Amino acid sequence: MLNVPSQAFPAPGSQQRAASGGRSKVPLKQGRSLMDWIRLTKSGKDLTGLKGRLIEVTEEELIKHNKKDDCWVCIRGLVYNVSPYMEYHPGGEDELMRAAGSDGTDLFDQVHRWVNYESMLKECLVGRMAVKPVAVAKGYKNHEKKLLNGILLKSQVSDLPAKEISPSYDWFQTESLVTIVIYTKQKDMDSESVIVDYQDGSFRAEIIIKDYSYLLHTELSHEIQEDITVRVAEKTGKVEIVLKKKDNISWKYLGHPLENHNSFTAHRDTGLYYRKCQLISKVDVTHDTKLYCLMLPPGTHLQVPIGQHVYLRQTVAGTEIVKPYTPVLDSLNLDLQEPLHPHNRYIYFMIKIYHTGLFTPHFDCLQIGDCVSLSSPEGNFKKSQLQELEELFLLAAGTGFTPMVKILNYALTNITSLRKVKLMFFNKTEGDILWRNQLEQLADKEKRFEVEFILSEPTSEWTGKQGRISLALLSGFVKRSLENSRVLVCICGPEPFTEQGIRLLKDLNFSKEEVHSFTA
Ligand code: FAD
Ligand code: NAD
């Protein structure tokens, strides 16, 4: 059984309270945390005012419910009475009111499409829209997709820019193998762009092509073994997925199409797909942070690209909670060998446990062998940002160190043009510094790498730099060694830290293209 923390949060003095100026979170009143919301939804209180009745909502009716104390919002055709939720919304009441009496699907997707609103708001469900209302933000098109021998008609793909060509697929078999071939017609495809899942007879392959996803989703006509091979021809963009038959019999057809089979849609319009991963190990990193190793199921092929994150999902007190986390490596890999083995089924996370938090205390209660759901990767960092780089500056605060781990390793291992990598690592106390020994050893061993620790709450023994991010601290450290050198500055940490860092870097004359900030 998971323990539900009974104490109220946000905790007084917690980092997020101090950060109330941040853009996406507002300070919530006492007794208005998400855990309090979950408790309210379980209390049996009538939250819609309709005594459990579900109604069909017309557009005219929806528009009428546009006030704080009477606020209905439509998300993907379902209408919710969000008035009771107002005070619990981490983004604040005003943010929620932007969608009052209208279709909030686009607004919702822009801010946090990964939040499981169906579960969070299920007690607020008023009913279904009689007719789909016009969206507030830019059009969300929902095209019907029809199958035509594995080829999509141009009119059956969503919002596709003229230069994009829809992929197509084919399949063939030998006595023991079935090979599915996807013609993406794209150069520079790699195996990170291919995500395959085989679970309970259902086969799903998602091919990520720039901002689009090509999906094959089918109930296979026969059983297969779980080890699936993925091959990508980088030059032609041909993807081959090789399935091993369980019985060596001839297949008459590949399978029955499932939802969104053979579709090519904007990535933002595809829902997040989850698979269950097993917890393999957890090891202390500091007093409140641990390194967790999760194992992908055998039928899954998934690699999380450098700088991207995934969502972990678990059920807390009957409600599904989803939070983003950035995979790291098992260590800083001091031998600087390429650690990203393509068939590696282990994914490592460095996660800080907030005792007053919603997700992490429950995550930490997982026992070895327990399962947690893990989404496909997301994020806008691209490896190409590191190509031909000469100087790399990493500004990390607290667990904002996590995206820097793979970037640091990849840059030092693969980018031959790189002359210098400098990490400025901001923490509260010495005890909070993640992988301090490994970082110091790396700096000793690798002359191109330099690390500086800055503490915001040091003891009197600390002789190093102190304070929070400031112009004085940055101007001495984030300095180009040559006027025209190719530079990238990566920044990640609490939102106010990141926002302030971006402003300061602008003052220091770094261009937008030279700064990459990690956010949700
Ligand atoms: P929460 O419930 O979010 O609470 C955290 C703290 O904030 C608590 O002290 C709580 O009391 C306080 N709080 C909550 N809501 C409010 C509010 N409205 N006002 C004031 N205070 C509040 N974390 C990692 O440890 N490792 C990672 O690799 C990692 N990667 C991330 C990647 C991305 C893209 C992003 C956006 C975040 C990442 N995080 C990571 C942070 C992570 O997603 C969670 O936010 C974190 O684990 C806290 O979750 P929680 O539910 O346990 O705590
Ligand atoms: P923390 O509270 O321990 O603070 C670490 C340091 O951040 C502090 O020592 C201080 O130097 C700086 N800092 C904190 N609040 C600040 C403020 N208001 N203004 C300026 N500087 C401030 O940090 P933590 O608890 O480890 O939190 C890490 C944060 O990083 C979380 O908010 C998490 O969501 C975020 N994170 C984001 C990503 C991502 O977007 N990809 C990845 C990992 C972590």
Image (tube, helix red, strand yellow):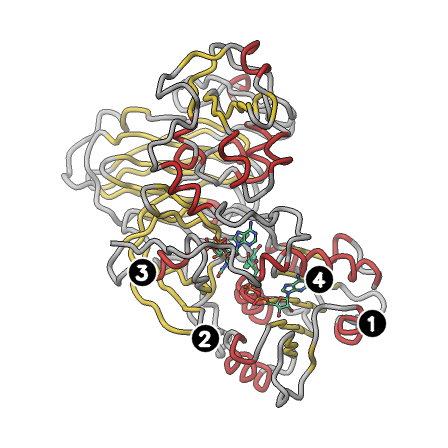
- Crowding around mark 1 (Cα neighbors within 10 Å: few <14, some 14 to 19, many 20+) is few
Q: Name the residue under label 3.
A: 365
Residue type at tag 2:
Thr
Q: Name the residue under label 1.
A: 482
Vertical relation: 358 (above or below) 150: below
Q: Which of marks 2 and 3 is nearer the N terminus?
A: 2
Q: Mark 2 points at which residue?
A: 286
Residue 11 location (% of width, % of height):
51, 59
Residue type at tag 1:
Leu
Q: Name the residue under label 4.
A: 488
Residue type at tag 3:
Cys
Q: What residue appears at the point 45 percent right and 35 percent down from the top-left corner?
A: 117
Q: How far apart are marks 4 and 1 (CA)?
A: 13 Å
Q: Earlier in the sequence, mark 3 or mark 1?
A: 3
Badge 4 marks a residue whose secondary structure is strand
Q: Distance between the residues labelled 2 and 1?
A: 38 Å
Of 481 and 152, the residue lying toward us: 481
Q: Which of marks 3 and 4 is in front?
A: 3
Q: What residue appears at the point 48 percent right and 40 percent down from the top-left corner?
A: 114
Residue type at tag 4:
Leu
Specify the quadrant of the image occupied by residue 112: top right
Badge 1 marks a residue whose secondary structure is loop
